[in-house]
Amino acid sequence: MKHFARIMVAAALIIMGVIDAMAIEEAKYEVIKRDNNFEIRDYDAHILAETVVEGNLEDAGKEGFKRLFRYISGDNRSGGKVAMTAPVSQEPMGEKIKMTAPVGQQRVEESWVVSFMMPGSYTMQTLPKPEDPKVTLRPVPSRRMAAVRYSGFWSEKGYLQHKEELESWIHGMGLTIVGDPIWARYNPPFMPWFLRRNEVLIPIDADIGQEKAR
């Protein structure tokens, strides 16, 4: 048992080292209040690349991720060119955009909107246009969000459980929900479930309710 535990710890350290080496830009925010796993955050304005996918939460997330990953991997209308090689060849290639975190997913009627945050170095004018008409770009203004963080598998059960916990906490704090919940995932698929960072985010009114009076 001890030998197994040492193997798991070693594997975790190796994986975390790999992830650190692959450090990616994350959404910028300021924590206004922290209460165990719950937080109130003020997010900076940013741009999303997003796509609408039909299906259940887990399948829609996979399909949406693939579409968006193709976009940031070069499936766009950038004017970039591939360098000359041997044999001599040249072809158009879209611009590659760095991966960011988190991957967002939000319910819209019977479908899901899956989104990638675009790096802060881009504007709506400088981002390459997607080749896939199912991928769109959208600016998001600064906003206040309530958040709950948890680890575990990417499952609808886990999402719904923590969404309900966050909604209960929001109401208990005297806060007002002003938008739909967002499921946020920060890690690549090969990350073990017990090391994954998952969150549910819910837009709330800028007034922090009962806390303002304390």
Image (cartoon, helix red, strand yellow):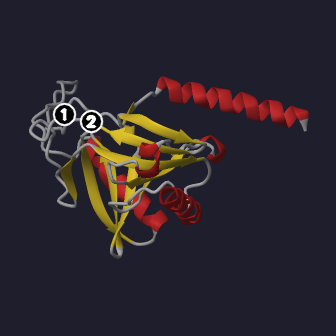
Amino acid type, label 1:
Tyr
Q: Does residue 58 lie above or below 10 as drawn?
A: below
Label 1, on which residue?
A: 122
Which quadrant of the figure contains the N terminus?
A: top right
Residue nearer the viewer, 34 or 20? 34
Q: Residue at x 41, y 64 (%)?
A: 60
x then y, percent, for residue 11: 69, 32
x then y, percent, for residue 104: 38, 52
Q: Earlier in the sequence, mark 2 or mark 1?
A: 2
Label 2, on which residue?
A: 97
Residue nearer the viewer, 167 or 207? 207
Amino acid type, label 2:
Ile
Other-residue count near label 2 (Cα within 10 Å), few / some / many at <14 / 14–19 / ≥20? some
Distance from the alpha carbon under mark 2 to that under mark 1: 10 Å
Query: Is 31 on the left-hand or right-hand side of 96?
Result: right
Q: Residue at x 18, y 25 (%)?
A: 83
